[in-house]
Image (cartoon, coloured by chain):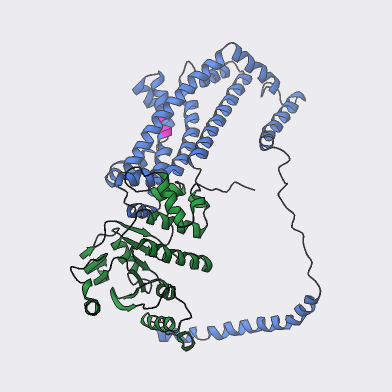
Chain colours: A blue, B green
Amino acid sequence: MSISHAPPDTPDPPTAGLAKSPVAAESSAADPAVGDRGSAAPELERLVSTKARGTRTPRWIRRTSGPLLLLALWQVLSATGTLSPDVLASPGTIATVAGDLVSDGSLTSAMGVSLQRVALGLLFGVVVGTSLALVSGLFRIGEDLVDASVQMLRTVPFVGLIPLFIIWFGIGEAPKIAIITLGVSFPLYLNVYAGIRNVDAQLIEAGQSLGLSRRGLVRHVVLPGALPGAMTGLRFSLGIAWLALVFAEQVNADSGLGFLMVQARDFLRTDVIVVCLIVYAFLGLAADFVVRTLERLLLRWRPTFTGQ
Amino acid sequence: MATDVHRTVTDQDAPVQSGAPAAVRVQGLTRSFGGRRVIDDLELTVRPGEFVALLGRSGCGKSTLLKILAGLDREIDGSVLVPRRRATAFQAPRLMPWKKVWRNVLLGLPGRPPRSRAEAALEEVGLAHRSEAWPKTLSGGEAQRASLARALVREPDLLLLDEPFGALDALTRIKAQRLVAELWQRRGCAVLLVTHDVEEAILLADRVLVMDDGVIAHEAPVALDRPRDIADPRFGELRAELLDRLGVEATAPQAA
């Protein structure tokens, strides 16, 4: 076998050598030219310091300028009549409507109800998702029992379960909170589980060599190691919690932000709808801020790329 | 082969056998991975306070042996006696990135040891000023010293070093080797250093073992005065001998 291979192989090295030699000849031919150029100094480029760049405007001004520009554009379009009030009310109108809704208490009470639903759903979801992930992440038997079922269930679109939940739990608070819980559990489960299973085996071994017990290993090595994954899961979960809230409140509700929107739709009040959407956006922003703060506190040990 | 070598050891050094104090006593140790015997009926004795270097080609089983001595690998046949107080420093520092350096040093110690204990150990390796740092902000040499402090704070009777200088640059390595020699002389614990650097082995060890085919195939006592000089002709002879044993033919000028 090797002999039959040999003949086709052998020509290769010489050709490679031949292919190389012209290059070598070229470079040697180019050498004198290089020598000639060597006498003239090469063109130098000044590397400009980036130290002062970006420090002139504070970060928060730069961050808020984007949304403000968008707002200005919207106002201009409304004022010139390009954007008819029937399609989308102007920012000015929306501000007045928001003021009215706040002063008559309907917006604040709706927000309170919605926030409570999200908080409860999130709480249950975090408890369920994390405990399932701990069971299947830490114990092989847990993995065998839990993981397959969760992986199967997570592919079911949870919004599709709303009718079933209404039949099971009635039309009170329970089905809404259940939907949010369901939506929140899966991303947390997946990320915490992956976080636990991705803990560096070398660190586990180091922990063992230091004489850590099983519990000590879980507490000092496995759980801290799974924390970045858990944070990612929490981010996803928060996003899904708001989504689930909108669905749950628009299907059947007599209070909350979603209910306010459905009501506004029936009266063709685009301004009220936009006010609710803006409230959702700000609540999402606040949730993101909470996670960022948590990450900053809990993941201080992780040096990350912060952009240039 | 292994038993042969062992016998010659005991002939030269009778008190090592049986009743004599030993920091490590391994007899008939065998470890297989899927039917392949990586360690095959190995014998090894280390005296208390002795510095032993273990050389060998990569894949010869030297790291497996160290793992077994550290108690991390227990799927073994044969008898292995090691001190209860033993500590390991790995090639990678393996510090927990989520714990500050001083907490890493205290990790795994029983009870609630005071921070001053960590500070003392860090002082000993010249790293006291970094005790508040996060491990990922340390340089390679600093991280390795922190790992060494974490091993020393346990006051081990046996210190296992698995190529601890392998990942360091040449200058840092020289400093780290000196540090280990110093610490060993101060602490008086037995040390087993796994390495593939022949010069490092001769510089530091009382006795150099060469592992091959799952047994200690060769051993060479290093009878040079400390601190040792690479330029010493006896150093060169020993290096040539060991390189030869490792299957690397030393060139004449190197041996001279």
Residue nearest the viewer, comparing A264 with B10: B10
Q: Main secondary structure of the magenta part?
A: helix
Compared to residue A185, the image places residue B97 above or below, namely below
* Relative image position of residue B179 (x, y in whole percent): 45, 63
Location of residue B94 (image quadrant): bottom left
Say whether residue A161 is visible: no
- Residue at image position (31%, 46%) is B110
Compared to residue B80, the image places residue B222 above or below, namely below
* Relative image position of residue A156 (x, y in whole percent): 40, 37
Which quadrant would the N terminus of chain B be assigned to in this image? bottom left
Residue nearest the viewer, comparing B84 with B245: B84
Q: Is residue A182 magenta?
A: yes
Location of residue A85 (image quadrant): top right
- Judge left or right: residue A196 versus residue B128: left
Residue nearest the viewer, comparing A13 with B10: B10
Magenta span: A180-184
The furthest residue to the right: A40
- Residue at image position (43%, 57%) is B93
Compared to residue B248, the image places residue B192 above or below, namely above
